[in-house]
Protein backbone atom coordinates (compact mmCIF):
# COMPACT_ATOMS: atom_id res chain seq x y z
CA UNK A 1 0.00 0.00 0.00
CA UNK A 2 1.11 3.54 -0.70
CA UNK A 3 2.77 5.16 2.32
CA UNK A 4 0.54 8.25 2.17
CA UNK A 5 -2.58 6.05 2.23
CA UNK A 6 -1.57 4.08 5.30
CA UNK A 7 -2.84 6.38 8.04
CA UNK A 8 -4.95 9.41 7.08
CA UNK A 9 -5.80 11.42 10.19
CA UNK A 10 -8.97 13.07 8.84
CA UNK A 11 -10.18 11.00 5.87
CA UNK A 12 -13.13 11.92 3.71
CA UNK A 13 -14.38 10.64 0.37
CA UNK A 14 -15.58 12.73 -2.56
CA UNK A 15 -17.28 10.94 -5.45
CA UNK A 16 -17.67 12.83 -8.71
CA UNK A 17 -20.30 10.99 -10.75
CA UNK A 18 -19.69 12.91 -13.97
CA UNK A 19 -15.93 12.25 -13.91
CA UNK A 20 -16.38 8.68 -12.57
CA UNK A 21 -13.85 9.33 -9.81
CA UNK A 22 -13.67 8.52 -6.11
CA UNK A 23 -11.16 10.71 -4.31
CA UNK A 24 -9.82 10.22 -0.81
CA UNK A 25 -8.75 13.32 1.06
CA UNK A 26 -6.90 13.69 4.35
CA UNK A 27 -8.34 17.00 5.47
CA UNK A 28 -8.01 19.20 2.39
CA UNK A 29 -5.17 17.19 0.84
CA UNK A 30 -6.04 14.79 -1.99
CA UNK A 31 -4.20 11.55 -1.28
CA UNK A 32 -5.62 9.13 -3.89
CA UNK A 33 -8.03 9.01 -6.82
CA UNK A 34 -9.81 5.94 -8.22
CA UNK A 35 -11.86 5.18 -11.32
CA UNK A 36 -15.42 4.04 -10.50
CA UNK A 37 -18.67 3.02 -12.13
CA UNK A 38 -22.19 3.79 -10.97
CA UNK A 39 -25.76 2.61 -11.18
CA UNK A 40 -27.06 1.52 -14.57
CA UNK A 41 -29.11 4.76 -14.79
CA UNK A 42 -26.29 7.15 -13.98
CA UNK A 43 -27.94 10.54 -14.63
CA UNK A 44 -29.65 12.20 -11.67
CA UNK A 45 -29.81 11.34 -8.00
CA UNK A 46 -31.60 8.33 -6.55
CA UNK A 47 -35.36 8.90 -6.29
CA UNK A 48 -36.97 5.52 -5.62
CA UNK A 49 -36.08 1.90 -4.99
CA UNK A 50 -34.71 0.03 -8.05
CA UNK A 51 -34.33 3.14 -10.25
CA UNK A 52 -30.66 2.29 -10.89
CA UNK A 53 -29.50 5.74 -9.85
CA UNK A 54 -26.64 6.55 -7.50
CA UNK A 55 -27.67 9.07 -4.83
CA UNK A 56 -26.20 12.55 -4.59
CA UNK A 57 -25.50 14.50 -1.42
CA UNK A 58 -23.65 14.08 1.86
CA UNK A 59 -23.50 10.73 3.63
CA UNK A 60 -21.27 8.79 6.03
CA UNK A 61 -19.93 5.26 6.17
CA UNK A 62 -22.14 3.39 8.64
CA UNK A 63 -20.67 -0.11 8.20
CA UNK A 64 -17.79 -2.09 6.73
CA UNK A 65 -18.71 -5.47 5.25
CA UNK A 66 -15.78 -7.89 4.83
CA UNK A 67 -18.13 -10.58 3.45
CA UNK A 68 -19.72 -8.59 0.62
CA UNK A 69 -20.73 -10.52 -2.49
CA UNK A 70 -18.78 -7.79 -4.31
CA UNK A 71 -15.47 -8.48 -2.51
CA UNK A 72 -15.58 -5.81 0.25
CA UNK A 73 -17.99 -2.95 0.85
CA UNK A 74 -18.60 0.27 2.77
CA UNK A 75 -22.25 1.04 3.55
CA UNK A 76 -23.42 4.62 2.96
CA UNK A 77 -26.08 6.41 5.02
CA UNK A 78 -28.69 6.66 2.27
CA UNK A 79 -31.45 7.78 2.60
CA UNK A 80 -30.23 11.10 3.97
CA UNK A 81 -32.43 13.70 5.71
CA UNK A 82 -33.27 15.42 2.41
CA UNK A 83 -34.30 12.09 0.88
CA UNK A 84 -36.54 11.33 3.86
CA UNK A 85 -38.16 14.78 3.60
CA UNK A 86 -38.74 14.30 -0.13
CA UNK A 87 -40.12 10.81 0.43
CA UNK A 88 -42.54 11.94 3.11
CA UNK A 89 -43.79 14.84 0.97
CA UNK A 90 -44.31 12.51 -2.03
CA UNK A 91 -46.04 9.83 0.10
CA UNK A 92 -43.26 7.35 -0.67
CA UNK A 93 -42.62 6.74 3.03
CA UNK A 94 -44.74 6.98 6.15
CA UNK A 95 -44.21 9.43 9.00
CA UNK A 96 -42.92 6.50 11.08
CA UNK A 97 -40.34 5.58 8.39
CA UNK A 98 -39.33 9.25 8.08
CA UNK A 99 -38.86 9.57 11.84
CA UNK A 100 -36.88 6.30 11.98
CA UNK A 101 -34.50 7.51 9.25
CA UNK A 102 -33.92 10.84 11.01
CA UNK A 103 -33.37 9.18 14.40
CA UNK A 104 -30.74 6.84 12.91
CA UNK A 105 -28.98 9.72 11.16
CA UNK A 106 -28.89 11.73 14.41
CA UNK A 107 -27.07 8.80 16.06
CA UNK A 108 -24.80 8.18 13.02
CA UNK A 109 -26.33 4.71 12.65
CA UNK A 110 -27.75 2.81 9.68
CA UNK A 111 -30.87 4.54 8.36
CA UNK A 112 -33.86 2.43 7.41
CA UNK A 113 -32.85 0.53 4.27
CA UNK A 114 -36.02 -1.09 2.93
CA UNK A 115 -38.39 1.66 1.89
CA UNK A 116 -39.72 2.94 -1.43
CA UNK A 117 -36.79 5.41 -1.39
CA UNK A 118 -34.39 2.49 -1.79
CA UNK A 119 -31.36 1.73 0.32
CA UNK A 120 -28.36 -0.54 0.60
CA UNK A 121 -26.05 1.88 -1.19
CA UNK A 122 -22.46 0.72 -0.93
CA UNK A 123 -18.99 1.44 -2.22
CA UNK A 124 -17.82 -2.02 -3.28
CA UNK A 125 -15.71 -4.11 -5.64
CA UNK A 126 -16.89 -6.03 -8.67
CA UNK A 127 -15.21 -4.21 -11.52
CA UNK A 128 -15.44 -1.11 -13.68
CA UNK A 129 -16.23 -2.34 -17.21
CA UNK A 130 -19.47 -0.28 -17.39
CA UNK A 131 -22.17 1.29 -15.18
CA UNK A 132 -23.80 -1.86 -13.83
CA UNK A 133 -24.83 -1.49 -10.19
CA UNK A 134 -28.35 -0.84 -8.89
CA UNK A 135 -27.17 2.48 -7.42
CA UNK A 136 -23.90 1.65 -5.71
CA UNK A 137 -20.38 2.83 -6.49
CA UNK A 138 -18.10 0.05 -7.80
CA UNK A 139 -14.34 -0.22 -8.19
CA UNK A 140 -11.85 -2.93 -9.05
CA UNK A 141 -11.50 -5.42 -6.19
CA UNK A 142 -7.90 -4.47 -5.43
CA UNK A 143 -8.90 -0.79 -5.17
CA UNK A 144 -11.73 -1.38 -2.68
CA UNK A 145 -9.25 -3.44 -0.66
CA UNK A 146 -6.99 -0.35 -0.35
CA UNK A 147 -9.92 1.87 0.61
CA UNK A 148 -11.46 -0.66 3.01
CA UNK A 149 -8.23 -0.83 5.01
CA UNK A 150 -7.97 2.91 5.71
CA UNK A 151 -11.54 4.24 5.87
CA UNK A 152 -13.17 4.09 9.31
CA UNK A 153 -16.86 3.93 10.07
CA UNK A 154 -18.18 7.49 10.32
CA UNK A 155 -16.12 8.83 7.40
CA UNK A 156 -17.89 11.64 5.48
CA UNK A 157 -18.80 10.86 1.87
CA UNK A 158 -19.85 13.56 -0.57
CA UNK A 159 -21.43 12.41 -3.86
CA UNK A 160 -21.45 15.11 -6.54
CA UNK A 161 -23.37 15.17 -9.84
Image: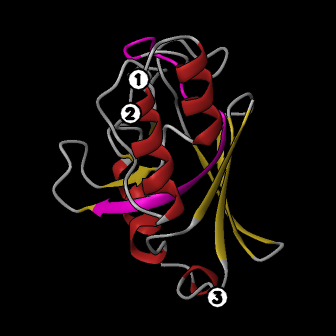
Quarter of the view holding residue 160: top right
Q: Which numbered marker is on residue 157? A: none
Verify CB contact (< 8 Å) between mark 2 and mark 1.
yes
- Measuring from the top left, give residue 50's x and y in whole percent: 37, 14
As drawn, 74 above or below 92:
below
Numbered badge on residue 9: 3
- Magenta residues (range): 49-64
Residue at 58% across / 79% down in the picture? 5
Question: Residue at point 62% right, 22% down?
Answer: 86
Q: Is residue 161 visible?
A: yes
Q: Which residue is mark 2?
A: 97
What distance separates the C-alpha of mark 1 from that of mark 3? Answer: 39 Å
**Which residue, given by chain and number where applicable, does mark 1 sit on?**
94
> Going 53% across and 21% down the picture, which residue do you hit?
87
Dot in front, 2 or 3: 2
Q: CA distance from mark 2 to mark 3?
A: 35 Å
Amino acid sequence: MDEYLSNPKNPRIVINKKRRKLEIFDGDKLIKSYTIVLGFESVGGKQIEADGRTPEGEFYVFTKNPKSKFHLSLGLSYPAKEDAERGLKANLITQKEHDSILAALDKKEMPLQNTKLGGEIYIHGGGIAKDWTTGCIALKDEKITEIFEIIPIGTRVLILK
